[in-house]
Image: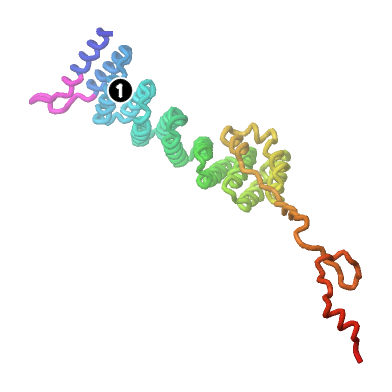
């Protein structure tokens, strides 16, 4: 290990020597300096000194950039991203990927720029989904400028799925519509049908039944028979507030086998609560005395006052 580090340090000294100027050497030798820094990076990598390896790659990239070798400058940063991954230093990856993509675009290689964004986003997707989301968005913009519609649809799909994973349902609905638009350009009706199902699920997750029904009416003609039947049952269940029918629709095989984010969304989707039934009124026994008609002549009403002596005298006297 020590021999590799000593070899790397010698390459660094040679690189610094190439960058020096003098009376007879007015311009630094960026080309040879970049080569020496690359050799030093390789030695540091073999010696498992990843931090120094990354620094040398960044210095090599800067030398290539000064020499207007933009593609090689971007490649050095591309390698530095992998070193950051090995170091578990994920916080720097997004910035490096954006820088490399910019250099690729300046060189005239936008496809390579989108590829480095995609690669970095895959590294960040599990631990830093917000950064991965921004990288995928930039990848969509890069490839759609170059009319690479299919590749743009693939990146747009990743954007929408991460938004669903993060619970960003409003933005996810817009992202799915953009993805549908890209598939329309290439005439992929099957993909549009699957996305129509995803859009209905997202709109229901937003709590907007009207938007879900509108999405089905707009794109349902691209769905196959099983998808149409399931979506009709699902929307009918939410319209009738029937949780059992909604659960059966959401448990259909093709929904369970959608992309993981959408199948989980269907699993966790709030079901309609059903029609509320008014509870029976509780009857309290003997709460009030029973009513007895005064014309019944019965003797059951013991609370009726009895006539006193004055009443008896009046009855005996009668009327003249």
Task: Assign the C terminus to one quadrant of the image.
Answer: bottom right
Compared across the picture, whether 109 is left or right of 262 comes to: left
Q: Is residue 299 above or below residue 280?
A: below
Residue 59 position within the rendered picture, expressed as x and y whole percent measured from the top left:
25, 25
Q: Residues within 10 Å of mark 1 (few under 14, many from 20)?
A: many
Q: Residue furthest bottom?
A: 320
Count of marks overlaid on the render? 1
Q: Position of residue 72 (x, y in %)?
A: 32, 26
| Rendered-image quadrant of the N terminus | top left
Quadrant of res 112: top left
Residue at the image position 77 percent from the left and 55 percent from the top: 285
Residue where numbered disc 1 is placed: 54
Name the foreground residue: 284 vs 130.
284
For residue 135, what is the image quadrant?
top left
Q: Is residue 82 magenta?
A: no
Q: Quadrant of residue 295?
A: bottom right
Residue 79 pos. (x, y %): 36, 23
Render colour scheme: rainbow
Residue range in magenta is 15-30
Magenta: predominant secondary structure element? loop
Residue 149 in sight: no
Question: Which residue is at a point 87% across and 72% down the rendered structure image?
Answer: 294
Q: Is residue 308 left or right of residue 62?
A: right
Residue 25 highlighted magenta (yes or no): yes
Q: Compared with residue 104, is residue 173 higher up or lower down, i.e. above or below? A: below
Residue lying furthest left in this view? 23
């Amino acid at each position: 290990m020590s021999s590799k580090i000593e070899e790397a340090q010698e390459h660094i000294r040679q690189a610094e020597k190439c960058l020096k100027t003098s009376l007879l050497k007015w311009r630094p030798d960026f080309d040879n300096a970049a080569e020496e820094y690359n050799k030093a990076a390789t030695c540091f990598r073999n010696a498992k000194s990843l931090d120094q390896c990354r620094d040398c790659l960044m210095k090599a990239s800067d030398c290539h950039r000064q020499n207007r070798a933009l593609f090689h400058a971007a490649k050095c940063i591309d390698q530095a991203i992998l070193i950051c991954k090995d170091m578990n230093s994920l916080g720097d990856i997004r910035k490096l990927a954006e820088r490399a993509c910019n250099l690729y675009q300046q060189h005239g290689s936008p496809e390579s720029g989108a590829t480095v964004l995609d690669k970095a986003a895959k590294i960040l997707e599990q631990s830093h989904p917000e950064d991965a989301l921004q990288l995928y968005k930039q990848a969509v913009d890069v490839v759609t400028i170059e009319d690479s519609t299919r590749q743009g649809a693939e990146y747009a799909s990743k954007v929408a799925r991460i938004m669903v994973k993060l619970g960003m349902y409003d933005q996810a609905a817009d992202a799915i519509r953009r993805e549908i638009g890209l598939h329309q350009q290439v005439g992929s009706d099957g993909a549009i049908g699957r996305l129509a199902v995803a859009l209905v699920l997202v709109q229901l997750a937003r709590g907007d039944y009207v938007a879900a029904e509108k999405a089905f009416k707009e794109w349902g003609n691209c769905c196959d028979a099983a998808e149409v039947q399931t979506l009709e049952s699902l929307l009918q269940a939410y319209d009738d507030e029937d949780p059992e029918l909604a659960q059966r629709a959401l448990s259909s095989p093709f929904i369970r086998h959608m992309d993981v984010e959408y199948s989980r969304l269907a699993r966790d989707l709030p079901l309609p609560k059903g029609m509320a039934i008014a509870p029976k009124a509780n009857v309290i026994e003997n709460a009030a005395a029973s009513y007895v008609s005064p014309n019944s002549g019965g003797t059951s009403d013991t609370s009726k006052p009895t006539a006193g002596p004055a009443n008896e005298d009046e009855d005996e006297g009668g009327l003249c």
